[in-house]
Image (cartoon, rainbow, N blue to C red):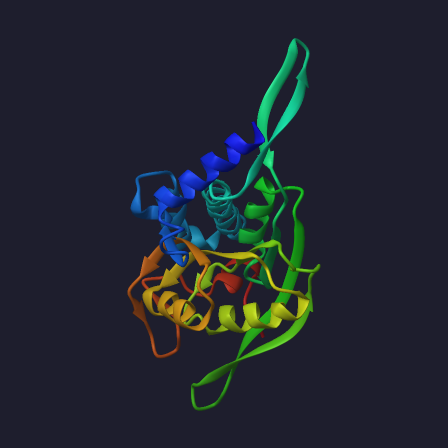
Amino acid sequence: MGKKVEVINAIYLFLSGSLKNPQMLHVLNEQSSLIHHFIAEIRNQDVQKDRMRFRRNLERIGEIAAYELSKTLEYRDSEVITPLGVAQVPMLKEQPIIATILRAGLPLHQGVLNYFDHADNAFVSAYRRHHKDGTFDIRLDYLSSPSLNDRVLILTDPMLATGSSMVMTYKAMLQKGKPKHTHIVCAIASAQGVDYVKSHLPTGITIWAGAVDEELTAQAYIVPGLGDAGDLAFGEKD
């Protein structure tokens, strides 16, 4: 049965295009589902006033992304003993490592963790340091992670704006080893950010975005976007 599951996995990956084009973008709101409601609420400036609801909606988007992402992972047959017999159930071959960029990524990270509840976790502190001329650079101050060697890595951040912080985070994490596959999960991405990630990271990166917006301002905010996800979730910074 194990061989049969592996064959099914290979067929699925081929049909989904991952063998022909290993660097993929999945836009979750391209199909009708409840994710439209959750994205609408995190965008809505009136609903945003309820921080708990904002965080919970990011968490829900993370849960949906985790479920869709789980369809691409590898499984093996396991026996489960029931009160009436034995059931053959495909189970994950291994748990992924879920990483997030502090602090904005925490609710989305929790959503993914709700589904991969035995996963290892990693945390990165990356932020924009703004200058008086309106420009900014990305600073990375902290990294805590298990070994990434030959593991599946899921990187979460609610907003993929320019893509520069995601690229810097990925490259910094390589000091912990080389993952066999990396998934990037975000609630909202800009088209420019997606292109930047594709051109600056190795092939084989898979992006899961709740929605993709076309416009990015000079201040690197996604339009229509939703604003500053970290401030909306946890309060404004000084």
Question: Which residue is drawn at the image coordinates 51% and 30% (left, top)?
Answer: 4
Q: Determine if residue 218 is in view.
A: yes
Of 205 and 10, the residue lying toward us: 10
Q: Position of residue 75 (x, y in %)?
A: 56, 37
Q: Is residue 137 above or below residue 37?
A: below
The picture places residue 79, in percent across and down from the top left corner, at 65, 23
Specify the quadrant that holds the C terminus.
bottom right
From what the image shows, is residue 142 above or below residue 153?
below
Say which quarter of the image contains residue 133: bottom left
Tell me if 96 is positioned left or right of 35 in this view: right
Q: Is residue 44 visible?
A: no
Q: Quadrant of residue 237?
A: bottom right
Residue 83 picture quarter: top right
Give the quadrant of the N terminus: top right
Which residue ends up furthest to the front in the rendered image? 3
The image shows residue 126 at horizontal and vertical percentages of: 58, 72
